[in-house]
């Protein structure tokens, strides 16, 4: 769930700050019953990686979270995405689980 949310948040931040989603990196922290977190950062040293845009968007984190959740409400591949069952032997998409190329997977 954190990984899917992280991808939705990367997409929302890319739209808000102008960075391509491929230049935003993620790190997921999940220690059950202790702490959960998502760290987003940019690792490129060119003009796209100055962090200024990400820092500015961070001051409006609530709007970014809301935008990420809104992006996850509707998939461009519906109803295919909504009807996907990863545990089905007939699917042949075992490794993707509930993630699809239309709504959650990023470059």
Image: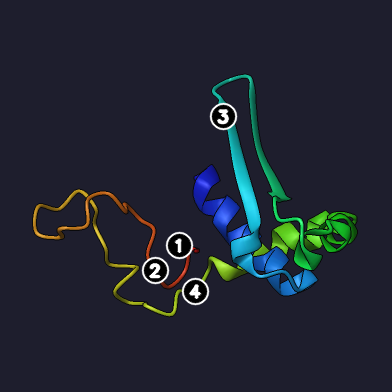
Q: Please name the residue that numbered disc 4 is placed on.
A: 74
Whether 101 is drawn above or below 89: the answer is: below
- Say which mark, if any, is on residue 30: 3
Q: Please name the residue that numbered disc 2 is placed on.
A: 101
Which is more foreground, mark 1 or mark 4?
Answer: 1
**Along the polypeptide, which appears first: circle 2 or circle 4?**
4
- Do callouts 1 and 4 mark residues in contact (Cβ within 8 Å)? no
Depth check: 42 or 101 in front?
42
Q: Single out the residue that lies furthest toward the front.
A: 46
Q: Please name the residue that numbered disc 1 is placed on.
A: 105
Which is more foreground, mark 2 or mark 4?
Answer: 2
Circle 1: is it few (<14), some (14-19), or many (20+) Cα within 10 Å? some
**Along the polypeptide, which appears first: circle 4 or circle 3?**
3
Instruction: Give left or right: position of 64 versus 104.
Output: right
Circle 4: is it few (<14), some (14-19), or many (20+) Cα within 10 Å? some
Say which element carries label 4: loop
């Amino acid at each position: 769930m954190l990984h899917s949310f992280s991808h939705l948040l990367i997409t929302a931040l890319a739209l808000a700050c102008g960075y391509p989603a491929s230049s935003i990196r993620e790190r997921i922290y999940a220690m059950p019953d202790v702490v959960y977190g998502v760290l987003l950062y940019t690792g490129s040293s060119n003009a796209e990686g100055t962090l200024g845009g990400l820092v500015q968007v961070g001051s409006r984190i609530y709007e970014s979270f809301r935008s990420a959740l809104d992006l996850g409400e509707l998939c461009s591949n519906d109803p295919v995405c909504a009807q996907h069952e990863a545990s089905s032997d007939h699917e042949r998409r075992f490794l993707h689980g509930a993630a699809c190329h239309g709504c959650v997977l990023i470059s």
